[in-house]
Image (tube, rainbow, N blue to C red):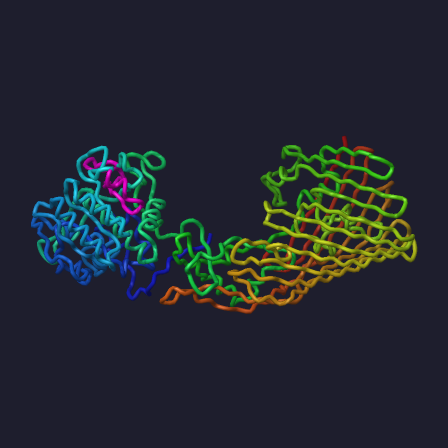
């Protein structure tokens, strides 16, 4: 899997906290909320949290440098310093003593709203909320005091959420089924508020904590039992608290970390992130006890909703999505042969659905579309259709209808040790194919096909149909007709004389379920047979790929808008000794690429490619109508062409994307050579047996895939 690391808006100027240190371990809540992974790149810097409580001992060693201007000096709670403890749980300094705050670089705006008994009257609480909401620097407001929720306090809370502040309020410690805060208030949070319950060290709700109840949709929990925090009885004093009021600052600190990672997030987005990433407790899903579950800071700071990337100058949008690039048709693993490009892709800047920046190794999202022979390739040559209906419509017209097996049990193969990279969906996906053909005395013929391979009907060399004999027949130049497995196609032929004939064909491929391949192709071919033993053909075709490039498909960062290929091919056949036929084919293609906006691949040159194949086929060698053959081929390979690889790598101070640019050759260093041999014979009218051997040297023109040897032994039964 790709490694995701968060990026902050600043570089860390000091070492990270040690999870084995006493400073970390004294506050067990840090471990329970999984905060440590977040500190690698975000510590809350630049975010101010208003704490509405009993005030703060601003000279405490844990809070030096953490207090925002305009805060209330002094903690009126002489019993231990409740407000000081709440502030310390959020932002205690990383200083080698005491504890560490969840967001230890955040700022605290202490607002005193309670008396010495930690109780806040409605008017005092309302004034505190209004004061915090009026501060442009305050992003989060916590309320952790005892109170009786009533007007004008309730209105002040609602107004604070309307002002864009994230309001986080303790659930209360009355062992009730519902929080203290009334539905008339939390019902108007509009996604900008959280109610927090407290748990013990066994992740069960404290007996004293109010449950989620009717507020489950806005409720989550955090550690609240025996929480060690700064106190008010001296500048190095500490105290232990239990209750929902010390669970609440854990959530506030997590919100500060999220906002420091991306200050452009709204309060509603922060709440959504916290709820979506919470660890489920109790009954599955959101429940009346734990609400959304336990705060999980590490998960909240990880990418959510998939990741995307942008090669544009701004991170204002998600840009293109990151999707695996399936490479085929000669567009081999070029980045592995360009060390600079490979290194750039190791540290690619990406963004999640909330436009939060991350570093991702994109080399791990790229894969080669291996074109190794599959079971279907072999079975096709033995008429693998399970039910066939042939209809003779007239002397000139015929129709064939093939229904294909929908039950994988109709095939005999070992799924657990299947070397052909198939799955049951592929079997079920090929249900029906149909063909209508016509031939007339005038020399005109036609062939209409549905759900056949793109090269079907265009693969003849003289009177030889290569696809009926060789697994890799399509690589002998016919890949330029399309790279998928199924298409609708039409071909028309005209035999001008015994020596001269012409063929025109077109197909359309829409194979979105498998690698999102979509293309259209047209072909014109002229054939000349100077003798009965010899035939040569010149073929010109054009392939238009929509969103694909020579069989490589990606809807994400490596996509192209389209590719247009013109190919010229020459094929020939020569029959010797009546039983043997030599054949050969060479095709060269020229591809123009229209780049996709936002793609990492830009500024393509014209791509030049080629493919070739040659071999021999024998018939009736040892018994009537048996067949044997041998072929050597090189499938489509780009021989010349390049593009710019733009990789987003970092953000400047204005959050503009900074790209690296590397010119990469799209011509692979390797060169694939394939060997294929077969022998087939009929034992009787119903039974055919055969053996096929294939060997691939440098598959896909890259060392990424090891050399491949395959041997197939098949038995075909006709019923």
Q: Is residue 90 left or right of residue 7?
A: left
From where the camera sits, is residue 295 visible? yes
In the picture, measured across the screen, residue 327 lies left or right of residue 617, that is: left
Percent x, y of residue 70: 16, 60
Q: Quick one: quadrant of the C terminus? A: top right
Does the segment drawn in magenta span residue 244? Answer: no
Part of the protein shown in magenta:
184-211
Position above or below: 332 against 27: below
Toward the top, the furthest residue is 719
| Image coords of residue 436 (percent x, y) | 78, 40
Magenta stretch, main secondary structure, is loop
Residue 107, given in percent of the width and then of the height, sits at: 22, 59
In the foreground, 182 or 115: 182
Apparent side of residue 412 relative to residue 536 in the rendered image (left or right): left
Image vertical order of residue 34 relative to residue 312, above or below: above
Query: Which image quarter: residue 205?
Result: top left
Residue drawn at the location 81% of the way across and 40% of the way down:
681
The mark total stands at 0
The residue that appears at 59% across and 45% down in the rendered structure is: 513
Residue 185 in the image: x percent, y percent? 24, 41
User: Is 190 covered by the magenta stretch?
Assistant: yes
Asked if one can make out residue 706 in the rendered structure from this viewpoint, the answer is no
């Amino acid at each position: 899997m790709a490694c995701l690391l968060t990026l902050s808006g600043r570089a860390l100027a000091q070492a990270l906290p040690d999870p084995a240190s006493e400073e970390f371990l004294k506050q067990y809540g840090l471990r329970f909320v999984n905060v440590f992974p977040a500190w690698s790149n975000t510590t809350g810097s630049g975010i101010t949290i208003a704490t509405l409580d009993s005030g703060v001992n601003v000279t405490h060693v844990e809070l030096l440098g953490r207090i925002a201007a305009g805060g209330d000096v002094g903690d009126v709670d002489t019993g231990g310093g409740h407000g000081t403890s709440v502030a310390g749980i959020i932002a205690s300094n990383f200083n080698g003593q005491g504890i560490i705050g969840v967001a230890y670089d955040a700022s605290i705006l202490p607002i005193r709203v309670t008396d010495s008994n930690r109780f806040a009257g409605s008017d005092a609480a309302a004034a505190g909320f209004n004061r915090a909401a009026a501060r442009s620097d305050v992003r989060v407001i916590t309320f952790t005091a005892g109170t009786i929720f009533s007007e004008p306090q309730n209105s002040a809370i609602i107004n604070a959420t309307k002002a864009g502040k994230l309001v986080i309020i303790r659930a209360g410690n009355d062992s009730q089924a519902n929080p203290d805060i009334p539905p008339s208030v939390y019902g108007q949070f509009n996604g900008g508020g959280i109610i927090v319950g407290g748990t013990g060290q066994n992740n069960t709700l404290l007996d004293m904590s109010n449950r989620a109840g009717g507020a489950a949709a806005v409720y989550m929990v955090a550690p609240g039992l025996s929480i060690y925090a700064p106190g008010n009885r001296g500048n190095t004093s500490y105290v232990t608290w239990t209750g929902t009021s010390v669970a609440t600052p854990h959530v506030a600190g997590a919100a500060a970390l999220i906002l420091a990672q991306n200050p452009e997030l709204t309060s509603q987005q922060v709440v959504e992130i916290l709820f979506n990433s919470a660890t489920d407790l109790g009954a599955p899903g959101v429940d009346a006890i734990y609400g959304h579950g336990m705060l999980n800071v590490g998960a909240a700071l990880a990418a959510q909703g998939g990741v995307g990337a942008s090669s544009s100058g701004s991170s204002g949008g998600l840009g293109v999505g990151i999707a695996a690039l399936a490479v085929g048709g000669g567009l081999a693993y070029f980045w592995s042969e360009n060390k600079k490009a490979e290194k750039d892709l190791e540290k690619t800047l990406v963004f999640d659905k909330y436009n939060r920046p991350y570093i991702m190794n994109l080399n791990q999202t790229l894969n080669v579309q291996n074109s190794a022979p599959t079971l279907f390739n072999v079975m096709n040559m033995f008429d693998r259709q399970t039910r066939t209906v042939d209809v003779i419509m007239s002397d000139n017209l015929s129709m064939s209808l093939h229904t294909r097996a929908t039950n994988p049990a109709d095939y005999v193969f070992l799924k657990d040790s299947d070397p052909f990279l198939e799955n049951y969906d592929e079997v079920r996906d090929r249900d029906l194919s149909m063909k209508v053909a016509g031939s007339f005395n005038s020399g005109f013929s036609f062939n209409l096909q549905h759900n056949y391979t793109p090269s079907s009907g265009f693969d003849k060399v003289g009177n030889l149909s290569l696809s009926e004999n060789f697994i890799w027949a399509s690589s002998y130049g016919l890949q330029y007709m399309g790279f998928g497995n199924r298409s609708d196609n039409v071909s028309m032929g005209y035999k001008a004389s015994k020596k001269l004939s012409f063929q025109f064909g077109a197909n359309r491929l829409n194979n979105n379920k498998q690698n999102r391949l979509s293309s259209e192709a047209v072909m014109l071919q002229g054939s000349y047979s100077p003798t009965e033993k010899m035939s040569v053909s010149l073929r010109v075709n054009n392939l238009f790929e929509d969103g694909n490039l020579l069989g490589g498909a990606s809807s994400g960062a490596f996509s192209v808008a389209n590719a247009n290929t013109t190919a010229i091919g020459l094929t020939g056949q020569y029959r010797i000794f009546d039983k043997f036929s030599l054949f050969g084919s060479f095709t060269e293609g020229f591809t123009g690429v229209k780049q996709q906006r936002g793609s990492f691949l830009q500024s393509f040159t014209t791509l030049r490619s080629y493919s070739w194949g040659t071999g021999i086929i024998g018939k009736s060698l040892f018994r009537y109508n048996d067949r044997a053959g041998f072929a050597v081929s090189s499938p489509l390979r780009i021989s010349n062409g390049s593009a710019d690889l733009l990789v987003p790598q970092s953000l400047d101070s204005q959050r503009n994307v900074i790209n690296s640019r590397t010119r990469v050759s799209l011509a692979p260093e390797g060169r694939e050579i394939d060997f294929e041999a077969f022998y087939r014979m009929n034992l009787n009218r119903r039974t055919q047996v055969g053996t096929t051997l294939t060997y691939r040297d440098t598959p896909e023109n890259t060392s990424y895939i090891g050399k491949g040897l395959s041997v197939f032994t098949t038995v075909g039964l006709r019923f």
